[in-house]
């Protein structure tokens, strides 16, 4: 590939990009996303975002789990275009935020803080008109960078993020329902939901590892507790969840072993039938995904203890390259919750 600078990327990025070269549907992302886009427009912008994210989650690292999920919910609906952040839209009075799967999203304030910080940083030493400088970093890029920073904060590992994602102007609640996988999905439904975004069964399994951080509302998995199926969920685990949920808990940690650490514990839990959603368990019902689960969950048996982390870096980059807007479409928003007024 002949993108400027692509050859100087770190090996992990280069390896991951091989997928993008082979898949024609990624050609628009290849046209739009560049390794140095934000770096050349405003050197230091990424650091300004990292600082703002770190400050914004300092008192509550759980917000970082929210940011990871925000990025996923953004990229699966109209591509990574920050449509999930909009309060208004040119097309519909009900933006994605209003849909049922998005009601439990959190971390919006982290993205707002990072956007304000990065635009202030990039405007420093510039003389701008009285109504302010033109914005430099799109909200979709801010979200992709913030998700990367949150991986570092929660899991202590790092990957590079390309930039140049345009912000969309359309956000429709029904599209979130139509595109986001639900916690009651079986493996066929999960596979098809990910395949529509050009993501494989391996990507599905790897990315599901994000369920090693953050929380879930009891309402998202309570159907599994009404009549406990002991071949699908550990009975003692199910009973402890039942107790928590009836004792007034609204949420429980996704990973009861290392709840705040982004690691491969999710896979170990899944192999032990101690994960929350039917969709998590569903990864055990297919020989291919079950095999990945074994690899990631039992990686102490392999020579490389970082198997899952390396795969997760690539899969996050790949998810962050789902672009559905064309090269001349979209805008760079001034404020992440609203489209620009012309
Ligand atoms: C495979 C299909 C997936 C399904 C069905 C699914 C479903 C869910 C559900 C139902 C919740 C709990 C919402 C609540 O009750 O508050 C949740 C939480 C979460 N999900 Fe997923 N998810 C999937 C994939 C992903 C992916 C690909 C990522 C990121 C790469 C992700 C990251 C998260 C995180 C970090 C949380 C915790 C959020 C928080 O603490 O605020 N999920 N997911």
Image: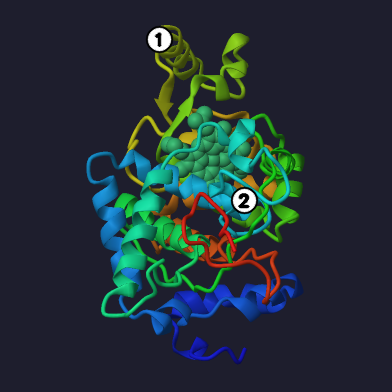
- Residue behind label 2 places its C-beta within 8 angstroms of ligand 1: yes
Q: Quadrant of the N terminus?
A: bottom right
Q: Position of residue 328 (x, y in %)?
A: 68, 76
Q: How is the image coloured?
A: rainbow
Q: Give the structural element (helix, strand or loop) at label 1.
A: loop
Q: Give the structural element (helix, strand or loop) at label 2.
A: helix
Q: What residue is pinned by disc 1?
A: 248
Q: What residue is pinned by disc 2?
A: 204
Q: Position of residue 261 (x, y in %)?
A: 33, 44
Rendered position, 136 above or below 257: below
Q: Quadrant of the C terminus?
A: bottom right
Rendered position, 61 above or below 82: above
Residue found at x 39% / y 59%:
115
Q: Position of residue 221 (x, y in %)?
A: 56, 23
Q: Residues within 10 Å of mark 2 (few under 14, many from 20)?
A: some
Q: Is residue 27 left or right of residue 278?
A: right
Residue found at x 36% / y 41%:
63
Q: Is residue 66 visible?
A: yes
Q: Are marks 2 and 1 in contact (CB under 8 Å)?
A: no
Disc 2 to disc 1, how far (Cα)?
Answer: 32 Å
Residue found at x 70% / y 37%:
177
User: Quadrant location of residue 176?
Assistant: top right
Q: Position of residue 39 (x, y in %)?
A: 39, 80
Give whichever of 122, 153 is nearer the camera: 122
Q: Is residue 268 visible?
A: no
Q: Is residue 161 left or right of residue 174?
A: left
Q: Is residue 311 left or right of residue 325?
A: left
- Residue behind label 1 places its C-beta within 8 angstroms of ligand 1: no
**Sooner in the amino-acid sequence: mark 2 or mark 1:** 2
User: Quadrant location of residue 124?
Assistant: bottom left
């Amino acid at each position: 590939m002949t993108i400027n600078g692509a050859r100087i990327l770190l090996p992990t990025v280069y390896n991951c990009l091989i997928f993008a070269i082979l898949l024609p549907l990624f050609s628009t992302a290849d046209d739009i996303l560049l390794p140095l886009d934000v770096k050349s427009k405003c050197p230091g912008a990424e650091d300004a975002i990292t600082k703002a994210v770190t400050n914004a989650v300092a008192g509550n690292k759980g917000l970082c789990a929210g940011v990871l999920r925000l990025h996923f919910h953004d990229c699966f609906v109209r591509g990574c275009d920050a449509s999930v952040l909009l309060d208004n839209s040119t097309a519909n009075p009900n933006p994605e935020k209003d849909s049922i799967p998005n009601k439990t999203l959190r971390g919006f304030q982290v993205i707002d803080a990072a956007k304000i910080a990065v635009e202030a940083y990039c405007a420093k030493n510039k003389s701008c008109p009285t109504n302010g400088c033109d914005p430099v970093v799109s909200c979709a890029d801010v979200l992709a960078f913030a998700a990367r920073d949150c991986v570092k904060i929660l899991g202590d590992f790092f990957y590079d993020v390309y930039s140049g994602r345009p912000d969309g102007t359309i956000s429709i609640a029904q599209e979130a329902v139509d595109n986001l996988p639900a916690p009651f999905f079986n493996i066929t439904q999960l596979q098809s939901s990910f395949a529509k975004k050009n993501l494989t069964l391996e990507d599905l399994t790897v990315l599901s590892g994000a369920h090693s951080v953050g929380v879930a509302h009891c309402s998202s998995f309570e159907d599994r507790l009404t009549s406990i199926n002991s071949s699908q969920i550990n009975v003692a685990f199910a009973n402890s969840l039942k107790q928590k949920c009836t004792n007034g808990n609204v949420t429980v940690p996704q990973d009861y072993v290392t709840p705040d650490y982004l690691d491969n514990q999710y896979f170990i839990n899944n192999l032990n039938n101690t994960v929350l959603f039917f969709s998590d368990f569903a990864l055990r019902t297919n020989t291919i995904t079950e095999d990945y689960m074994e690899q990631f969950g039992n990686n102490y048996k392999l020579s490389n203890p970082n198997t899952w982390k390396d795969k997760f870096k690539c899969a996050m980059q790949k998810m962050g390259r789902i672009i559905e807007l064309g090269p001349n479409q979209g805008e760079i928003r001034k404020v992440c919750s609203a489209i620009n007024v012309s």
